[in-house]
Amino acid sequence: MSTIAFTALSTATFKEWRRDKVGLFFSFLFPLVFLVIFGVLFHGESYGGKTYVDIIGPGVMSWAVANGAVFGVAYWLVGWRTSDLLRLVRMTPTRVPSVLTSRFAVSIVSGVIQAAFFLGFATLPFLGLHLELRSALVILPLVAGILAFAALGLLVGTYAPSPDAGAAIANTIVLPMAFLSGTFYPVAGMPEWIQTLSLALPMRHLIDGAAAAVAGESLRDVLVPTLILLGFAVLFSAFAGRMFRWSSKD
């Protein structure tokens, strides 16, 4: 993989992400709307000895980051492919690994910034999310989750014929996954068959890992979901790499 190509593509992609005002709004502010609504409605209530915000905070953050990774990569891939920008890149010495790893790197950086902003806002007094010393370990499932959902975005972008179609497909996948994985309601309170089904979804493990880290639970409770997410990332990446198309005409 060329370092020069990786750096150039990462810089261009990050600038593109930073200049997308609408995308930044939905990445940073839209998830906070849900947190504020649920936080205000259920302020002072507890579940299993934890406040409601302590329970849904990691879930909403996980959904926001996963959503950003899937949509960002899918929209980027379809946009660059339909505009023939990828075909122009192909005419240079740049290879597929440089293209994909640069986009994954931007997804990680933007996702970490998004999560830090979210957690900082959630700790404000009127919401009151509690952070522990071990909460910094949230970076482990967070990065693994971003990789898994970015790879899922590659799969979506490979099949989608247009950016709008990519957004629709991504939304169809991510939104049901969010509800089934316990984003807005504790998964422990769901029917047993849903709890079992959710174990096959990467978002369930992202939420579990993030919640364990934020709550300061054991390292094992953080590492196990992280390793599962890395497995999803490898699986999705393998499929996406085999089906990657430089042009809509391929």
Image (cartoon, rainbow, N blue to C red):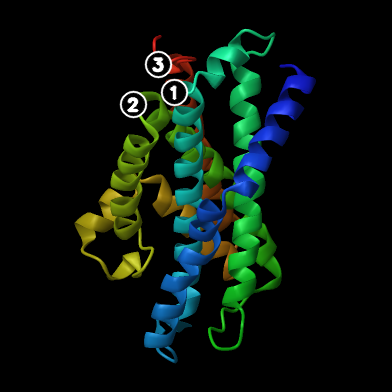
Circle 3 sits in a helix, a strand or a loop, which is it?
Answer: loop
- Mark 2 Cα-neighbour bin, 10 Å: few <14, some 14–19, many ≥20: some
Q: Amino acid at mark 2?
A: Pro
Is the Cβ of the residue at disc 2 closer than 8 Å to that at disc 3? yes
**Upstream in the sequence, badge 1 or badge 2?**
1
Q: CA distance from mark 1 to mark 2?
A: 8 Å
The circle on residue 82 is 1
Q: Is residue 4 above or below residue 167?
A: above
Q: Is residue 177 above or below residue 231?
A: below
Please give the name of the residue rendered at 44% of the width and 82% of the height, measured from the top-left corner. Answer: 39
Label 3 belongs to which residue?
248
Circle 2 sits in a helix, a strand or a loop, which is it?
Answer: loop
Does residue 230 show up?
A: yes
Please provide percent x and percent y for residue 248: 40, 16
- Mark 3 Cα-neighbour bin, 10 Å: few <14, some 14–19, many ≥20: some
Circle 1 sits in a helix, a strand or a loop, which is it?
Answer: helix
Q: CA distance from mark 1 to mark 3?
A: 6 Å
Please give the name of the residue rendered at 33% of the width and 26% of the height, measured from the top-left corner. Answer: 161
- Mark 1 Cα-neighbour bin, 10 Å: few <14, some 14–19, many ≥20: some
**Upstream in the sequence, badge 2 or badge 3?**
2
Q: Amino acid at mark 1?
A: Thr
Q: Amino acid at mark 3?
A: Ser
**Upstream in the sequence, badge 1 or badge 3?**
1
Q: For this rendering, which residue is in front, 26 or 228?
A: 26
Please provide percent x and percent y for residue 117: 63, 65
Q: For this rendering, which residue is in front, 214 or 119?
A: 119
Is the Cβ of the residue at disc 1 closer than 8 Å to that at disc 2? yes
Label 2 belongs to which residue?
161
